[in-house]
Amino acid sequence: MNFSERLKKERERRNWSQTDLAEKIHVSRQSVSKWETGKNYPSIEVLINLSDLFHITIDELLRSDEELKEKIIRESKQLAFPKRKLFFDSVLLLGAFLLVSKLIIFGLNKFVGTDITILESMPAVLNFLPLALMVIGGIGSEYLKDKYVD
């Protein structure tokens, strides 16, 4: 029995309409209808609520529905994705900002005749810091995209 059949069976066993079930789990009746016809699947949060409401395990709800299991696995992988991706995107943007700033200062010094210096005693290795940040941010972001997003 797949998820949609199990959901409908549990709802009907309690003599609830789709509207009754929707009100109990705070969703629309249309959502319940789509779940029961297999046109859509609920989120992890709603699955937990359904499990509690029907007093059955999530495993009992999901076990026979391969498509729903894949959706749950995909969603669980994506839970950690945004925060980590934001970090690497921020590192990339910081590197780009520093690189653009250095280029603007270089251009002003070369073509306008200004004499702007940035940390005069800075080691030469730090000249590559913007590039290093951009590479680290780009690689990290791409790695996460490949790992967590289909």
Image (spheres, rainbow, N blue to C red):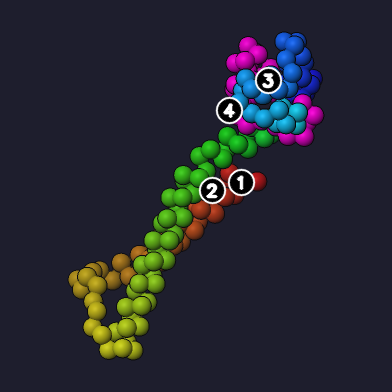
Along the horizontal axis of the image, is 52 left or right of 7? left
Q: Point out residue 132 in the picture as x, y percentages from the top left corner.
A: 40, 63
> Is residue 57 a member of the stretch shown in magenta?
yes
Q: Which residue position is annotated with label 1? A: 149
Along the horizontal axis of the image, is 58 left or right of 14? left
Lower sequence index among marks 2 and 3: 3
Give the overall secondary structure of the magenta segment: helix
Q: Are marks 3 and 4 in contact (CB under 8 Å)?
A: no
Q: Secondary structure at mark 4?
A: helix
Specify the amino acid type for callout 1.
Val
Q: Are marks 4 and 2 in contact (CB under 8 Å)?
A: no
Lower sequence index among marks 4 and 2: 4
Q: What is the spatial separation of the Cα atoms under label 3 and label 4, in whole angstroms?
A: 15 Å
In the displayed orientation, state which residue is furthest to the left: 121
Specify the amino acid type for callout 4.
Glu
Q: Nearer the viewer, mark 4 or mark 2?
A: 4
Mark seen at residue 44: none
Q: Point out residue 78 in the picture as x, y percentages from the top left corner.
A: 56, 40
Q: Secondary structure at mark 3?
A: helix
Mark seen at residue 21: 3
Q: Which residue position is annotated with label 2? A: 144
Q: Residue at x 54, y 54 (%)?
A: 142
